[in-house]
Amino acid sequence: MAYIWSYMKKYPLTLVGSFLGSIIFVIVNLGLPTILAKIINESLINEDYSSLWQNISWMFVLVIIGLLGNILNVYAGSRITTSVVRDIRNDMYRKIQNYSHQEYETIGVPSLITRMTTDAFVIMQYTEILLRSALTPVLMIAGSIILIFLNAPSLSWLLFSAIPFIILIFSVIITRSRPLSQQLQVVLDKINLSARENLTGLRVVRAFAREDYQVKKFGRANDEYANLALRLNKLMGSAQPLFAHVLMWVTVITIWSALGPLEQGSIQVGTILAFTEYLFHALFAIMMFSQIFMMSPRALASANRLKDVVSMPISIDPNSEGVKRTSRQGYVEFKNVSFAYPDEPEFEAIKNISFQAAPGQTTAFIGSTGSGKSTIIQLVPRLFDVTVGAVLVDGVDVRDYNIKSLRDKIGYVPQKINLFEGTIRENLQFANKDLSESEMDHAIDVAQAGDFISGLEKGYDSFLSEGGSNFSGGQKQRLSIARAIAKKPSIYIFDDSFSALDYQTDAELRRRLAAITTQSTVLLVAQRVSSIVNADQIIVLDKGEIAGQGTHEELLAGNKIYQEIAESQTNEGEVD
Ligand SMILES: Nc1ncnc2c1ncn2[C@@H]1O[C@H](COP(=O)(O)OP(=O)(O)OP(=O)(O)O)[C@@H](O)[C@H]1O
């Protein structure tokens, strides 16, 4: 509740409007039966037609005020609920932008999506219920009790004997629904994970003809959700009929117990009619009020999941007051760096790594799969922080930089290509929003992407689907490289970025890159020896440790692991 209130209170005027609407609603709903009782008891029985018309006119006035109140209530309520959910989503999205990989991995991308969509939607529904069922029912209960005591005190016991039944019904429902509501959101995460995995891996699923398996896997999560939802809906759905049942009994008992006083003339027909209306409003208000508690377990579960996202401590401090400018450009140094991934703190993915890279030089990393190549280069843009030692860029520890300034220095081409939905132009401008047409031509040209783009009908305005899935692996790699070049960084990082290129394109691209990186340092992860023969230094990795360091010729002469890699590729006819 406090969580939602922290968002609701940002809209004080709209809140006042909603409260005013609630007050009008109560006045109108209790005013109408009160006037009706007057009409029956006074105007009709005494055949006083002038007071009859007067009362009917008051009823008209009340109905019109009620209509205006309703409009105000609905309008203000909608504004608040939609604003609250929009603000929650914006806050989440902003926070997620600052997440490091560790935070993403802790919550998981599918869960983040469920939280931003479904959990936020649950909060929207709950805000709506709060606005509808908090103030109005309280006023309605208070007003009904006062009017019952003023007009029919002898029947008030009926109200008080019905209240425990209503409270009992809702207490049972609320207690039982709490664990179900919490489970429901967790199972929804599973559905999201399964759907996402299936849809993003559609080609693999088809290629392995595993559609049935995937359908069953999704079906299991979906069935689990349906079972839980059914149990929850049955519980929630039983509230209304049980309430109606209590109300019917109370109405029958009211008529029955009013017969005596009616005969004795101590109570009038209009009063009984008004009493049943007050009673209905009071009990209905209790039911409305209970909705807050019925919905609260689910809302609480969702609010906690949303709060977890926003309050998640950021493991990589963006250090906004950190270093923004350096006199040197393009120097990278690793000083005795060891690193363990946060989810496996016992296992050091890289151990005691030291090397220096200077502008105009290419430093290449090679080694068997899982030897730690990607891990090393991810430490330069501070995607993770070192566990031991230090990474220096231009002489400054990367942790001392303003993180944006550090990353501005780097053009990163990740192993898993990430292009965004939009045009080629937009994807390149992602690196540099002020990119001129000639700069774009140059980046595309160096990345060897000009040929295939000129063959496209719309050229730079050709559209990439989500993740660039309508382009080939090699085309995507070249666009990703062009995007890094467009940034004109002082440090280039290529993580296995040439693997999808044919040998000729790979060689030409490296030649063109060498020409534009005379003032920049290049860190390059490669699988093929042919991609790194001209590197100024090659670092051979084995199980996270440096097993050799030198030029291609030096390593070929004296490093066993490098010799084995080169030999295996020569046998395949790969090395130039
Ligand atoms: N996010 C992660 N969480 C935990 N361990 C990880 C993570 N990423 C990589 N590792 C582990 O760290 C080690 C080094 O992985 P890394 O990706 O750096 O290897 P690599 O040399 O780049 O391999 P490849 O050539 O296959 O890309 C491996 O043992 C891997 O299992």
Image: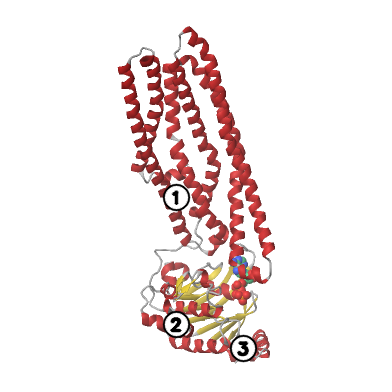
- The residue that mark 2 highlights is 444
Q: Give the alpha-carbon distance from disc 2 to disc 1, as whole Å.
A: 42 Å
Label drawn at residue 194: none
The reply to whether discs 2 and 3 touch (Cβ–Cβ < 8 Å) is: no
Mark 1 or mark 3: which is in front?
1
Q: Is the residue marked 1 within 8 Å of ligand 1, measured from its CB?
A: no
Q: Residue at x 45, y 12 (%)?
A: 267
Q: Secondary structure at mark 3?
A: helix
- The residue that mark 1 highlights is 85
Q: Residue at x 55, y 46 (%)?
A: 301
Q: Is residue 515 above or below residue 76?
A: below
| Badge 1 amino acid | Val
Q: Residue at x 54, y 22 (%)?
A: 250
| Badge 2 amino acid | Ile
Rendered location of residue 505, percent (x, y): 53, 87
| Badge 3 amino acid | Leu
Q: Is residue 231 left or right of residue 405?
A: right
Q: Secondary structure at mark 2?
A: helix
Q: Quadrant of ligand 1?
A: bottom right
Q: Residue at x 32, y 29 (%)?
A: 61
Rendered location of residue 192, percent (x, y): 58, 57
Q: Residues within 10 Å of mark 3 (few under 14, many from 20)?
A: many
- The residue that mark 3 highlights is 555
Q: Is residue 310 above or below residue 419?
A: above
Q: Is residue 145 above or below residue 308?
A: above
Q: Residues within 10 Å of mark 1 (few under 14, many from 20)?
A: many
Q: Give the alpha-carbon distance from disc 1 to disc 3, as whole Å.
A: 60 Å
Q: Is residue 264 above or below residue 94?
A: above
Nearest to N terminus: mark 1 or mark 3: 1
Mark 2 or mark 3: which is in front?
2
